Image: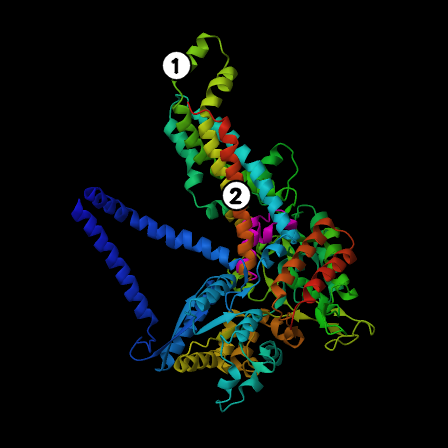
């Protein structure tokens, strides 16, 4: 017994660095933010307790609803698109073709590139007058568009760029999932005369579902937190606030208008929404997952 | 194994110990020893690129000019970043001794006694410092009758025009348009020439500006004889955005865009278009000159005061306006200097000494000439340094013409919020292109709702 406790101490010692960092930079700030969300505070003066005042103001704030809607729009479009494209590419890359390593690297490069650098490059691509995208569309006689300055196109443009940026990450995870599917299942299916589509529908898709579920959950969380590309590509939240997402909104409230309590209240509402989504995924969607 | 655990643990203790010790050292009030027993004065600013070079040059010269103080100048990036860092440093009790800031923040600092009242420092001076400051700059930094911040780098918007293009389309390359109506004619001429002349670049247009540009809109309201925020009869503040001059200001821009003789871009698009020779005239800060001049190679450019508006007797109702002459309103931009109250009188004295030196007649004149910012003192405007520079480079003259027509934006704590809201309405106005009255009325209603609860 005494020996076991001694062993435990060693484990705790190993855990300590991580625990200290997690407590200092994650746990404490989270509770501190929750506390500040009940105050009105501009950082310089003394915080003033306002109870749920920030929250009730938030639910009367049309711009908060707009930012929430934009965030949901972003998530609802970017997550399925990202899953669709990365699955297709992963299946292509799962074939024994030559220079496969090169292709995998190419798809992974955007993931490891800084989002800020990527955003600047895409700003050029989307430029209304000199942008690459309009130049390419012109070949097919499609009229040029002011992508990031048009309220109808700014969000789709950001979504497209984000999907491209995150593709490599999901492709790698899908590839790992695909390689876990036993070859003999496909062989058996082929002997039974199953078509490519039937093989996909009845073998690949169900056996890949744990991977898809994982990617879906992680991408949903990530897409609710979208910020950098919006900040870099559409200053002020885009034309007519069409790309104003929740995190950018609370950033502006906190660091441009110095309403920290209010911004933190918004952050907590966002946290609750993400939490609810994840809970839904876990409790409802996970039932549909086949863990073979 | 056990040894390894112990070693890890000792490393941890060591790191934590070092952090604590370092903290204690930093917290000690340092009469600090940089180059002997000089008092270190920390100065945070947002002067990057060519402006930063001039700034560092002058700071170096100050440090060499005397033996009591050492100014440590730190570039914090943009004004936005600077403001954030200053706020964070105040919370951490590690504020700089001097920093550039906007007036709205100065008001916050006054409220929480974070900065030193400059009147107390000026009182011990033998010369009449306040009497020599350009009146509008003095007023801009005076709060409840007291000077709390020092004007430092104030700029004005001006009109940049492409002289080579002007000559080509048959306009006088030695002057810009004097009035807004004249500017429209110029734009028409430039656009028409490029559309109709065989071989000319058809994408060239007359006037460029950035989208949702509140600064430009406010300038134009003043030019049209309007007002921004005023005290209503019931003591509640109101905006002048639903009034005729504001509607006229917005309609002016909408009409030019509708006619296709002007174009709006995002961010600095209009400046890039100007550099590329795609646009005849742009409205931008005079400070853009130092950022653009190295890139303008293919043509000659001129800088003119912003065009104004000749008002009728019924329109010239504001105190600064007169009927029958060109009314050139411009609104100041740029920042001021705050001296923080960090509890060490030596540092405050050093900070003041530096600010005084930096804005003194000759140094201030040199700063103005090299950066295009407005001089702070009247004596700098009259100095030989400025006079000589204006003779050598006629493009530096425009801000001095505009000096007599300067206004500043309302110094309200809610002003940034209002500005943001205004930008939304301006953006809508030039995307949807509905009647100007509509957007102006909505803007006024929204802004007035905020002003109702705001205090001066």
Q: Nearer the viewer, residue B202 or B85?
A: B85
Q: Is residue A271 above or below residue B395?
A: above
Task: Provide the residue designation for mark 2.
Answer: A274
Q: Position of residue B456 (x, y in %)?
A: 64, 73
Residues tagged by mark 2 and mark 1 found on one chain of the structure:
yes
Judging depth in this view, the residue of B430 and B179 nearest the camera is B430
Which chain does the residue under circle 1 lie in?
A: A
B84 or B304, which lies in front? B84
Report x, y in % for residue B423: 65, 57
**Up-down relation of residue B399 to residue A25 (above or below):** below
Residues tagged 2 and 1 counted as in contact (Cβ below 8 A): no
Q: Number of labelled discs?
A: 2
Q: Which portion, as a residue range, is magenta?
A: A234-257
Measured from the top left, where is residue B299 in percent x and y? 58, 58
The chain identifier of the residue carrying mark 2 reads A
Q: Quadrant of residue A74?
A: top right
């Amino acid at each position: 017994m005494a020996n076991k406790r001694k062993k435990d101490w060693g484990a705790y010692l190993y855990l300590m660095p991580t625990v200290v960092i997690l407590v200092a930079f994650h746990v404490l700030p989270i509770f501190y933010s929750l506390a500040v969300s009940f105050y009105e505070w501009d950082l310089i003066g003394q915080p003033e307790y306002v109870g749920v005042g920030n929250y009730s103001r938030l639910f009367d704030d049309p711009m908060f609803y707009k930012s929430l809607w934009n965030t949901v729009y972003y998530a609802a479009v970017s997550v399925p698109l990202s899953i669709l494209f990365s699955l297709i590419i992963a299946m292509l890359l799962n074939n024994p073709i030559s220079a496969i390593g090169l292709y995998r690297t190419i798809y992974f490069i955007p993931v490891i590139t800084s989002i800020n650098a990527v955003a600047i490059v895409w700003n050029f691509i989307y430029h209304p007058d000199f942008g690459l995208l309009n130049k390419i569309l012109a070949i097919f006689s499609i009229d040029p568009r002011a992508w990031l300055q048009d309220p109808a196109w700014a969000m789709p443009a950001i979504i497209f760029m984000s999907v491209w940026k995150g593709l490599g990450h999901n492709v790698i995870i899908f590839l790992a999932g695909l390689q876990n599917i036993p070859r003999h299942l496909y062989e058996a299916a082929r002997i039974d005369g199953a078509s490519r589509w039937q093989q996909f529908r009845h073998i690949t898709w169900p056996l890949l579902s744990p991977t898809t579920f994982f990617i879906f959950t992680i991408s949903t969380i990530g897409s609710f937190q979208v910020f950098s590309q919006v900040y870099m590509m559409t200053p002020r939240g885009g034309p007519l606030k069409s790309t104003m997402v929740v995190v950018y909104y609370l950033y502006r409230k906190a660091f441009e208008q110095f309403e920290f309590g209010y911004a933190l209240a918004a952050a907590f509402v966002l946290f609750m929404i993400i939490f609810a989504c994840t809970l839904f995924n876990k409790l409802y969607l996970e039932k549909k997952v086949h863990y073979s | 194994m056990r040894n390894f655990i112990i070693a890890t643990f000792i490393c941890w203790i060591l790191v934590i110990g070092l952090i604590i010790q370092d903290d204690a050292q930093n917290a000690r009030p340092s009469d600090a020893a940089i180059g002997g027993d000089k008092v270190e004065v920390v100065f945070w600013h947002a002067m990057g690129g060519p402006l930063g070079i001039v700034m560092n040059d002058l700071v170096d010269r100050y440090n060499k000019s005397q033996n009591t103080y050492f100014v440590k100048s730190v570039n914090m990036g943009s004004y936005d970043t600077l403001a954030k860092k200053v706020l964070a440093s105040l919370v951490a009790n590690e504020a700089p001794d001097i920093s550039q800031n906007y007036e709205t923040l100065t008001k916050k600092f006054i409220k929480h006694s974070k900065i030193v009242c400059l009147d107390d420092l000026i009182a011990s001076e033998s010369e009449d410092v306040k009497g020599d400051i350009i009146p509008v700059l003095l007023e801009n930094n005076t709060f409840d009758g007291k000077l709390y911040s020092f004007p430092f780098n104030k700029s004005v918007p001006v009109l940049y025009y492409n002289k080579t293009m002007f000559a080509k389309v048959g306009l006088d390359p030695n002057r810009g348009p004097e009035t807004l109506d004249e500017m429209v004619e110029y734009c028409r001429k430039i656009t028409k020439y490029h559309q109709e002349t065989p071989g000319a670049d058809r994408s060239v247009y007359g006037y460029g500006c950035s989208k949702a540009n509140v600064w430009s809109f406010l300038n134009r309201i003043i030019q049209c004889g309007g007002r921004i925020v005023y005290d209503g009869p019931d003591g509640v503040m109101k905006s002048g955005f639903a009034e005729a001059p504001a509607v006229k200001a917005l309609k002016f821009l909408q009409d030019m865009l509708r006619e296709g003789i002007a174009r709006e871009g995002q961010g600095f698009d209009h400046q890039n278009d100007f550099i590329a020779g795609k646009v005849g005239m742009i409205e931008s800060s005079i400070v853009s000159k130092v950022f653009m001049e190295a890139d303008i190679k293919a043509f000659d450019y001129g800088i003119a005061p912003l065009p104004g508006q000749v008002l009728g007797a019924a329109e010239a109702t504001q105190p600064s306006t007169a009927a029958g002459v060109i009314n050139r309103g411009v609104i100041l931009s740029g920042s001021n200097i705050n001296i923080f109250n960090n509890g060490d009188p030596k540092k405050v004295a050093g900070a003041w000494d530096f600010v005084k030196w930096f804005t003194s007649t000759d140094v201030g004149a040199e700063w103005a000439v090299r950066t295009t910012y407005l001089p702070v003192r009247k004596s700098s405007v009259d100095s030989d340094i400025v006079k000589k520079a204006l003779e050598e480079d006629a493009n530096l003259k425009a801000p001095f013409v505009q000096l007599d027509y300067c206004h500043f934006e309302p110094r309200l704590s809610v002003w940034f919020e209002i500005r943001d809201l205004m930008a939304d309405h301006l953006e809508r106005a030039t995307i949807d292109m509905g009647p100007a009255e509509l957007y102006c009325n909505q803007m006024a209603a929204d802004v007035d709702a905020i002003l109702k609860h705001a205090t001066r």
